[in-house]
Every structure is written in structure tokens, then in C-alpha cells.
């Protein structure tokens, strides 16, 4: 798989974290945290703005991923507002296929995000190892993400759905992570171009206003990539990818995306993808219909985690921004 081109953000190699099934102490702890409250373990990832570590809350068995960001780097890039928005959004999302942000704290030099830990790692790395996923695995991911996006769209436009931002929980369930480019759904009529070039919907490329339906296009591109091993519009260079997308927009997308599907993509998945990749958002398959799509229903093996996996009151305190 060739290097993916990012727009306004390069997320390949950024630290990523997700959720596990451990439960915390039964009594909520309503206080501010410091780094001394945690035993720090091995590093889980490294990125431009800091690192992620496996950590344990002292005097408990609660395992988390501690994302440590350097204030100097965030200020240098002018991302203070984006970080505050990411914290505000993710802290209020509670869904079994969305990475939990339990809390955050900071000191003079760093900001610390207390996140769930995903023992099975990154979906992108799993895709790199196997190159493609089979129908069962892909359909399961589609059902999980369609459900998570349905929940998100009551409050949030995700804006950056791709393998690098998906993590795997204890049972292999997908966890949406990295909400840096997400915005609240009341902020409609957006025009900001952001995300990864291979996943940009036509509304962004043409500079049109958009709403939460842009996430449906990304879901279709993701389904294609999981089954084929690469995005439908990926090229070695930024200009070639842009050229392909431009041709697609003006010649093909007004009706539907008429991309060539390799033999690894079965007919049912082809139908789902083609219904998601539409030029007009009003003609895209709604998320409710993605969940009911015959191919998803026939092949998904989604398993909902036990209620115990959502027990996170030990770290739940008011978010003060």
C-alpha cells in the first residue's frame, strides 16, 4: 500500500489508542488527576506532538492509554483550539464502537489524555499484514461503523473515517479514534477541506458546503479499501490522485461512482459501495439502510461487548475546558 496523502494533516504514524474490557473501582473518583496518579508502562505509539503509553491507575486494576502531548508543539502549530474541541467532543461520546476519553489533565509542559486501551492494536496495521479482509471481517466493520456514525451524527460530523483512525478492542470490535477533525453537527454549512486525499468526498473537493453525509462517502471508500487492499483513487503522487478524483467528479460521480471493482470485491459489497459513493448526498444510502443492507446482514458477525466493558465511572469527572 503506497503512502496516503493527507490534506492539512498527516495522520500516518500518529499515536493511536482504544478500548479494553477492564473495569475500574466501583466508587467514582471526583478529583483532578496528576501524572503521579499513574504507573507508566511501555510506549504504544509516537507522533509529532507527543507519545502514548500504557498506564495503570495506582491502587487499582484500571488499565488505560495515556496520551501525552507537548504544549510547545501544539502552540507552534496553532492547534490549541482544535485540541480543546477534540477533548470536548470525544469526552461526551459514549458508544461501544467509539474510543472513550475518560478525562484529561495538564501541567506546565504537557497535556495528558486518559483514554481506553485497545489490546488488539490498530486496524490499519492488521490490514497491512493481511493486505485485504474477507467478507465477514469487512461486513462486521461496516455494521459497527454505521452504528457508531448513526450515534455520532446526532451530535458530531466525524470528517475523517479511515483505517488509521480505527482501533481494535478486546474482542476485535472496532473503535473510532482521533476526533481532531470532528465538529459539532449544529455547525452546518461547513467548507473546510480536511482529512486524507484518498477519502475526500466530492463536496470537499469542489468547495461546496456539506453536512454529516460526507461520512457516508468515507464509509464507501473504506469498504473498498478493506476488500481490495487499497483505496479506489489511490495513486503514487498527489497530483495523480487529484487527477483521478477530478475525472471521477465531472464524468462519473453525477450518477454514481463507476470505479472498476477487482475480483476480491463480491457483488453484494459492490452494491453497497456504489450506493455510498454518490455525487449528490441526497442519493447516498442512509446509515440505517447500511445496517439493513443484505450483504452486511448476511456476513457481519458483530458481537456486542458485555456491559462491564462500559464501566468507566472511576475516571469520570466534569470536563473543564
Image: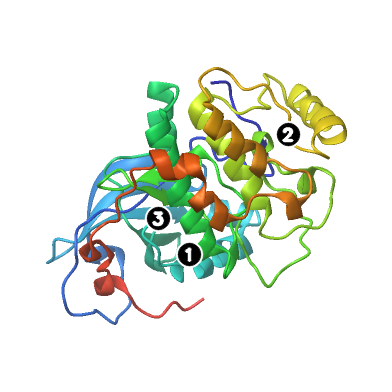
Residue hosting label 2: 257
160 in relation to 27, above or below: above
Give the residue drawn at x 78%, y 64%: 189
Label located before the other in sequence (1 or 3): 1
Give the residue drawn at x 43%, y 25%: 128
Residue 2: image tag: none
Callout 2: helix, strand or loop? loop
User: Marks 1 and 3, how far apart in space?
Assistant: 12 Å
Asked if residue 143 lies left or right of residue 254, the reply is left
User: Marks 2 and 1, how far apart in space?
Assistant: 32 Å
Q: Residue 111 in the image: x percent, y percent?
A: 44, 61
Residue hosting label 3: 97
Q: Residue 78 in the image: x percent, y percent?
A: 66, 57
299 in relation to 229, above or below: below
Give the residue drawn at x 81%, y 57%: 209
Front residue of this view, candidates 57 and 311: 311
Residue hosting label 1: 90
Q: Which of labels 1 and 3 is toward the front?
A: 3
Sort mark 3 into few (<14), some (14-19) or many (20+) by Cα contacts within 10 Å: many
Q: Which of labels 2 and 1 is toward the front?
A: 2
Asked if residue 109 lies left or right of residue 24, the reply is right
Q: Identify the image quadrant of residue 5.
A: top right
Amino acid at each position: 500500500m503506497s503512502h496516503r496523502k493527507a490534506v492539512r494533516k498527516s495522520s500516518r504514524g500518529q499515536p493511536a489508542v482504544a478500548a479494553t474490557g477492564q473495569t475500574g473501582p466501583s466508587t467514582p473518583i471526583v478529583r483532578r488527576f496528576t501524572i503521579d496518579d499513574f504507573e507508566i508502562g511501555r510506549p504504544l505509539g509516537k507522533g509529532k506532538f507527543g507519545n502514548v503509553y500504557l498506564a495503570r491507575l495506582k491502587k487499582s486494576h484500571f488499565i488505560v492509554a495515556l496520551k501525552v502531548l507537548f504544549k510547545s508543539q501544539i502552540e507552534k502549530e496553532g492547534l490549541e483550539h482544535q485540541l480543546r474541541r477534540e477533548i470536548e467532543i470525544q469526552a461526551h461520546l459514549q458508544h461501544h464502537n467509539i474510543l472513550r476519553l475518560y478525562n484529561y489533565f495538564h501541567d506546565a509542559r504537557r497535556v495528558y489524555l486518559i483514554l481506553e486501551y485497545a489490546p488488539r492494536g490498530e486496524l490499519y496495521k492488521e490490514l497491512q499484514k493481511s493486505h485485504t479482509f474477507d467478507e465477514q471481517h469487512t461486513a462486521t466493520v461496516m455494521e459497527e461503523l454505521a452504528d457508531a456514525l448513526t450515534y455520532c451524527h446526532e451530535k458530531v460530523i466525524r470528517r475523517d473515517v479511515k483505517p488509521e483512525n480505527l482501533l481494535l478492542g478486546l474482542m476485535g470490535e472496532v473503535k473510532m479514534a482521533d476526533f481532531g477533525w470532528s465538529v459539532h453537527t449544529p455547525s452546518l454549512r461547513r467548507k473546510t477541506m480536511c482529512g486524507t486525499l484518498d477519502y475526500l468526498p466530492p463536496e470537499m473537493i469542489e468547495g461546496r458546503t456539506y453536512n454529516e453525509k460526507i461520512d457516508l462517502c468515507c464509509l464507501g471508500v473504506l469498504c473498498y479499501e478493506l476488500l481490495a487492499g487499497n483505496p479506489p483513487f489511490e495513486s503514487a503522487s498527489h497530483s495523480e490522485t487529484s487527477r483521478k478524483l477530478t475525472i471521477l467528479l465531472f464524468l462519473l460521480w453525477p450518477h454514481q461512482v463507476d470505479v472498476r471493482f477487482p475480483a476480491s470485491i463480491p457483488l453484494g459489497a459492490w452494491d453497497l459501495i456504489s450506493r455510498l459513493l454518490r455525487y449528490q448526498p441526497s442519493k447516498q444510502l442512509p446509515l440505517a439502510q447500511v445496517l439493513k443492507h443484505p450483504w452486511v446482514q448476511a456476513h457481519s458477525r458483530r458481537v456486542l461487548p458485555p456491559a462491564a466493558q462500559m464501566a468507566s465511572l472511576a475516571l469520570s469527572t466534569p470536563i473543564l475546558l
